[in-house]
Image (spheres, rainbow, N blue to C red):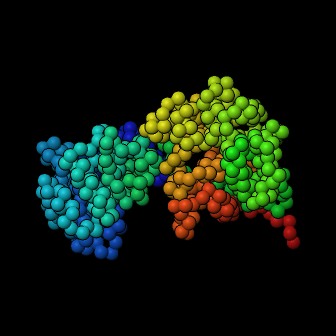
């Protein structure tokens, strides 16, 4: 069976589905989808499944057929099922007509779709099943179904979306069409394979908890996934406990270059994060006059950026760097140094404005690690942030290929892309990260990992996973999401990194007797 973490485009899912349909008896996949949906629905309803009031919304396509088949199974399991069918039976596919016939022969009730809004609000539903539209939706949902979705989104009950929440683009995570609308589901059971749009953009707000039902399609029908969900297993080879026989030189140096006048805090945040994520030594290198020391983190060595030798350290450049000529000179030196390199913030803006700097970045022997937010990515691509957000996966892939770099495109469902096109979507993080300084912390984390010998790809995967997971941990403990500050993430990231290192690592043999 394919990995539950694999992500497939709509085109890939369609190709897999068509190949499987050609090899299986008619109606098999719809039957399996209905069974999988009903199973998940019963899990959500819980022990009150018998006579539980469940509303099933079925649309005109095969997604609606899946919903009808699920409704049939639910009714036969004893649930009190009401179906609103928004379809012309003469225009249904053969499989959907068969599901419709099965539903009519089961103990469920069909309600008049013309009274859909009243049906939705008339009862206190245990669960609503969304089978209005699947991955084939190409335009914004309009009346009367728009009003139906508005009513569902106003209810306080669980909503299970089948395959993809109606109105959500499965490839991009955007709402389909200008002025579009989508079902806001608490849970989604997605068929055949995972879809990237469920995990980035609006996906995490609208899809809720996602589970994959592969419909027992044989592995031979699947293509190799070009994208996957980020998780610790992807970078576990670099996680290991530290040997007793080690010293500060064993774990590398980080130079954090930034801190122009009035922006010293950004460099300090990044440097503190690098120190607490395991770098042996951390230099905070300021464009402006450096402070004598950081009173909260006196272990940091504060220097003037012009005095630093970038060749012997990992370098995180950009936090508070500014875009002055002096900043450009420092960035040029870092690009030419050959050092493991994290490029963030104003360093990205400088590269976006200079063909020469872009060429130096692209020509490096080893990929740098870029950490743009959407506007910075837009500047690098000479486009708008809206266009970047319209297809985050494509934007990250394009940047990685054009700049020969590992790109970490920040946002809900952060995208990590390699120059060759391999891609991962991060699953950790929450709105607590939407505050000043969190990007500086992320850059510092990544710099510390590079200093300890990590390659850019696993460092990016681990950096965003740890960064987001720290925010999730703090919110679960009651700190945030409102008012969480960037510096609060750092000790939590340290704890998570230590925990993962002991869980995934292999203990070094001890010399103690």
Residue 474 picture location, percent across and down: 57, 64
Can the viewer see residue 72?
A: no
Viewer-side residue, 260 vs 492: 260
Viewer-side residue, 506 vs 172: 172
Residue 419 vs 233, above or below: the answer is: above
Image quadrant containing the C terminus = bottom right
Query: Within the image, what quadrant is residue 492 found in?
Result: bottom right
Q: Is residue 212 left or right of residue 226?
A: left
Viewer-side residue, 394 vs 124: 124
Residue at 18%, 45% in the rendered image: 92
Can the viewer see residue 410?
A: yes
Residue at 29%, 60% in the rendered image: 154
Residue 293 picture location, percent across and down: 81, 54
Residue 469 vs 8, above or below: the answer is: below
**In the current view of this chain or complex, which residue is farthest to the top?**
355
Viewer-side residue, 285 vs 411: 285
Residue 237 vs 346, above or below: the answer is: below
């Amino acid at each position: 069976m394919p990995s539950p973490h694999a992500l497939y485009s709509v085109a890939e899912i369609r190709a897999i589905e068509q190949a499987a349909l050609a090899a299986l008896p008619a109606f098999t996949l719809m039957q399996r989808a209905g069974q999988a949906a009903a199973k998940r629905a019963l899990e959500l309803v819980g022990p009150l499944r018998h006579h539980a009031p469940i509303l099933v919304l079925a649309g005109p396509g095969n997604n609606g057929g899946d919903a009808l088949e699920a409704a049939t199974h639910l009714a036969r399991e004893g649930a009190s099922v009401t179906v609103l069918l928004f379809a012309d039976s003469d225009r249904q596919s053969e499989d959907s007509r068969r599901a419709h016939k099965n539903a009519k022969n089961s103990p469920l009730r069909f309600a008049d779709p013309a009274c859909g809004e009243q049906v939705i609000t008339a009862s206190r539903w245990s669960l609503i099943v969304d089978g209005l539209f699947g991955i084939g939706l190409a335009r914004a949902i309009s009346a009367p179904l728009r009003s139906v979705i508005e009513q569902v989104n106003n209810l306080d009950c669980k909503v299970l979306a089948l395959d993809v929440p109606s109105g959500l683009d499965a490839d991009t995570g955007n709402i389909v069409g200008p002025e579009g609308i989508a079902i806001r589901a608490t849970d989604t059971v997605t068929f055949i394979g995972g879809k990237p749009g469920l995990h980035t953009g609006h996906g995490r707000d609208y899809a809720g908890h996602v589970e994959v039902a592969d419909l027992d399609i044989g592995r031979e029908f699947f293509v190799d996934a070009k994208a996957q969900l980020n998780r610790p297993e992807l970078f576990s080879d670099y996680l290991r406990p530290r040997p007793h026989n080690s010293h500060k030189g064993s774990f590398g140096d980080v130079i954090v270059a930034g801190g122009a006048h009035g922006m010293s805090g950004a460099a300090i945040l990044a440097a503190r994060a690098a120190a607490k994520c395991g770098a042996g030594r951390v230099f905070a290198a300021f464009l402006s006059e450096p402070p004598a020391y950081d009173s909260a983190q006196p272990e940091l060595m504060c220097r003037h950026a012009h005095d630093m030798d970038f060749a012997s350290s990992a370098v995180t450049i950009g936090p508070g760097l500014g875009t002055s000529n002096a900043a450009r000179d420092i960035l040029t030196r870092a690009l030419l140094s050959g050092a493991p390199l994290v490029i963030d913030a104003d360093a990205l803006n400088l590269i976006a404005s200079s063909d020469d700097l872009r060429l130096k970045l692209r020509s490096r022997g080893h990929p740098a690690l870029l950490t743009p937010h959407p506007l910075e990515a837009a500047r690098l691509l000479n486009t708008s942030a809206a266009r970047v957000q319209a297809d985050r996966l494509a934007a990250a892939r394009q940047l990685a290929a054009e700049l020969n770099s590992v790109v970490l495109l920040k946002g809900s469902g952060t995208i990590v892309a390699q120059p060759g096109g391999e891609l991962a979507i991060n699953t950790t993080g929450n709105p607590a990260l939407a505050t000043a300084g969190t990007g500086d912390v992320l850059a510092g984390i990544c710099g510390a990992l590079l200093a300890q010998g990590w390659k850019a790809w696993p460092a990016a995967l681990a950096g965003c996973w740890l960064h987001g997971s720290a925010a999730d941990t703090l919110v679960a403990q009651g700190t945030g999401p409102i008012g969480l500050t960037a510096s609060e993430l750092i000790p939590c990231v340290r704890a998570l990194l230590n925990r993962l290192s002991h869980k995934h690592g292999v203990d070094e043999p001890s010399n103690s007797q």
